[in-house]
Amino acid sequence: MAYLKMQEYEKAINDCEWALKCNEKCIKAYFLMGKAHLALKHFNESRQCYEKILQIDPQKESLFKDCMNEVNLEEKRMKDEERAMKEVESGKLAALSIEELLQKLDRPDQNILYYTGGIRLLTGAIKDCTEQTLFRTNNGFSILKDNEVVRRGFCAERKNAAEVDLSVSLLFLWQAVCTGNEENQRLLLTYPDVNAQLPKLLSSGVLEIQKQTLALISLYSENENGRRLLVRHQDLTKWLQILMMLVNSTDARASSAMNILSNLTEEERFKTQCRLMLSTSVLPLFTQLLTSVKLVNQAALARCIGIMGNLCADVVIRMQMAECKECWQACLKLVDECFDVGTPKYQECLFAVLGLMMNLLLESNGIIQQSAEPEFFTLLFQHFAVDISGKCMSLLREKDGRIVTRAIGVLSRILPASLSAVEEAVKGGVVKKMIKFLKAGGQIASNYGIKTLSICTRSNRQAQEDLVKSDKKFSVLMKLLESENEIIVGNAAFCLGQCLVVPGAATSLLNSNVVMILLKHAGGDATRTSVQENAAIALGKLCVAEPRHIVQLRKLNGLAILNSSMKYVHST
């Protein structure tokens, strides 16, 4: 490492080779040797070193990708510069014009309009990678650093008309030189003035400056390397708030801001930054936007809600949002307002907020079992459970199938939080409604619907009786038991078991193949043991409620199968 710092690359490689003679699996030696080869432009040798790291430890895939990316970028940079130099040497006008324009811009103490005009001419001259490369190799990025007139105009807090024109021209220039050019993107962000000014330009009150800043940032956000540069060189905690505020815009800025935010959420580092300021800075703004659905750009708000929902994939962010009372209140208010209006542009916000609510309740997903679910639901969920389930019940009348499916999904995840919510839902006819949706089919809706029924029948006798009345001879549950989806099968078996306590329910199944189906699942090899457990318990309850099923059980050698599956059964 010391030799690398001293740029003694051959000596560094020699040290690493000695280290590898002592320990042929020394990852650090391969890493440093790869760096030394890269500095010497030995690209293939550098790649071989990094490939060795991945062979030794496949868990180092992230490091491997970063290192290989660095090699690829450096090799491309060198080839681009060699090609550009050949074009200059051959006297191509397009190449020569870049040098000439940069020299003119290098003249000191000219009028600001002189520089603005020159920058625009330069922007027009940059057509492809060759011109982008010549801009870089001729110190084009130093326009801002070395020219006091340009720097002062660009960095002015309150810009006059000439300074606005200059700033917009620079933003256009940087878009031209950075489009598809990762080395130029990297260099631009290393300039302190650019780094400091980007958040200010992003929140500028001047429409054109804000628009072109968004366009520039979009170039970065659209590729992995660009996003990493932004995360590394910028404090994106400020950006999240600024970009979210653009939901208020009625023009293309709102869409552009949401595209950038959506792209940034793919970066783990961005999520880490979000954790630190979500509660104090982002959530208050987000809840304000949710309660202003009629005053903002609805399409952009729907995107923004979806982005916040995606951020919930991060456990820390999800818990922060789920524990925010104001956030739940705002979600419920938005559901009310969108449902009342009922026009398509509001439907997207409604669809998005239901998705967000489902994600906030993510921990409650899975197969219902006889034993109590893990203690996930906080008092906050219990407080809102009746309201949330009531809203979802109302949404079941919606014509938009996507919204109905998500409403069922929210129901399936919120009902376990509150017995009162279950009671209200059962009174509202939830069982009959779920049977209707289950008959219609659709795997996602079936998944949510059967879970909702399982939750209701677990704790509510009325729900059990309603299901027996609504699903004659359990035809819907029997069909679900033959699904290829384990979650659906597990919950269908649980639901059936719960309903067999209703007088006559087990008798209605006498001429069916229910024993064979339940035996298949009880003795099967499903990856989720709750499938075997629920099937075995349902079979036991079936035979207790109607002993005539035991005859069929014996014919199928069911007692032996049940005995082998007893390891899955924790309680009856």
Image (cartoon, rainbow, N blue to C red):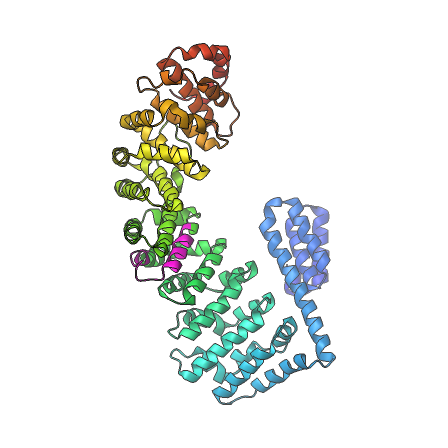
Asked if residue 138 is among those painted magenta in the image, a careful observer would answer no
* Residue 380 falls left or right of residue 169: left
Query: What is the span of residues highlighted in magenta in the rendered image?
Result: 287-309
Rendered image quadrant of residue 160: bottom left
Asked if 149 appears above or below 309 in the picture, the reply is below
Asked if 71 appears above or below 175 in the picture, the reply is above
* Residue 376 falls left or right of residue 221: left
Q: Residue at x 59, y 66 (%)?
A: 180
Which residue appears farthest toward the right when viewing the image? Answer: 90
In the rendering, at what x and y percent does residue 85 appear?
71, 75
In the rendering, at what x and y percent does residue 46 appear?
69, 57
Asked if 562 appears above or below 131 in the picture, the reply is above
Give the position of the N terminus as an image quadrant.
Answer: bottom right
Q: Residue at x 62, y 60 (%)?
A: 70
Asked if 68 appears above or below 252 in the picture, the reply is above
- Residues 407 and 142: in front is 407
In the rendering, at what x and y percent does residue 66 appear?
60, 56
Magenta stretch secondary structure, dominant? helix
Which residue appears farthest toward the bottom when viewing the image? Answer: 110
Q: Residue at x 48, y 58 (%)?
A: 264
